[in-house]
Each structure stands twice: as C-alpha cells, then as structure tokens.
Amino acid sequence: MDKSLLQEHASDAIRFWERGRIIYNAALVLVVVVHFVAGYPASKNVLSINLGLGLFLLAVVANILYCSAYVVDLFAQSTDFRDTWRRYRWLLLVIGTTFAAVIAHFMSQGAFVTIPPS
C-alpha cells in the first residue's frame, strides 16, 4: 500500500471512529449515571476519591479498547471489500458500544450497590 492510499484510509478511519467515540462515551456515561440515579440517595454514600479514580481508570481503558477498531478498519479498507466495509462498519460501532455498555452496567452495578438498612 503506498503512502497516499494509507493516508486516505487512515483519514477515513479517523473521521468515522472519532465521531463514533462521542456516541460510545455518551452511552457509557449514560449507563453509569442511570445506575447512580437509580441508587440515589444511597449511591451518594459511596462517592469517594477512590471511586472517582476507578471510574477514570475504567474510562481510559474503555477508550484504549475503542482504538482496537482502527486495526480492524485499516485492515478491512486495504482489501477488495473496502466499499462494503465502509457501508457496514457502523455495525461494529453498535456491537462494540453495546458490549462496552454491558460491561459498564455490571461495573456500575457493583460500584453503586448499597446495603439496605436493617
């Protein structure tokens, strides 16, 4: 693959996936906020620096994992299936975002679980 073709594919991937990152992060934030609100007011008792740092760490890890889509995208764009891939790569965004949201659901459920008063 020559430099200009790689540059074209990389620019196309960045354009698509960085717009998708907004949707991805919004979905994960929504899951966490819904769990926090659902457990409120008891969930405010678990707020701490450590929880904030843990959520920050998980957000960074989630965004690093999101970058794995670039590997798939650049590979697919270098094949004869480039046009088909570009039409349907939104499915990878939807599936990946859903998968990450499920993980965020379980992590948030564990973070904001409160013990009911006896």
Image: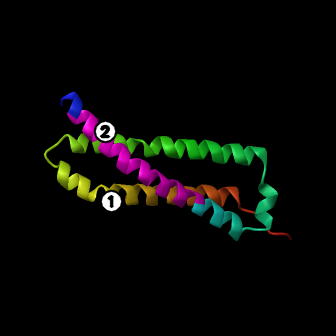
> Which residues, given as a range, are shown in magenta?
5-29
Q: Residue 52 in magenta?
A: no
> What residue sits 32% from the left and 41% below the top?
11
Judge from the rendering whether residue 82 lies leftward or rightward of residue 72; answer left or right.
left
Callout in the foreground (1, 2): 2
Q: The C terminus lies in which quarter of the figure?
A: bottom right
Instruction: Give the residue type at disc 1.
Output: Leu
Residue 93, image x and y in percent? 38, 56
On the image, numbered disc 2 is attached to which residue? 10
Tag 2's secondary structure? helix
Q: The N terminus lies in which quarter of the figure?
A: top left
Residue 2, image x and y in percent? 18, 29
Residue 52, image x and y in percent? 71, 47
- Image quadrant assignment for residue 47: bottom right
User: Closer to the camera, 64 or 46?
Assistant: 64
Instruction: Give the residue type at disc 2.
Output: Ala
Q: Is there a contact, CB below 8 Å, between mark 1 and mark 2?
A: no
Judge from the rendering whether residue 94 lies leftward or rightward of residue 111; answer left or right.
left
Tag 1's secondary structure? helix
> What residue sits 76% from the left and 68% below the top?
40
Judge from the rendering whether residue 10 lies leftward or rightward of residue 42; answer left or right.
left
On the image, numbered disc 1 is attached to which residue? 91
Residue 115 visible somewhere in the drawing: no
Of the numbered discs in the image, which one, if any, rests on residue 103? none
Is 98 placed above or below 52 here? below
Q: Residue 26 in magenta?
A: yes
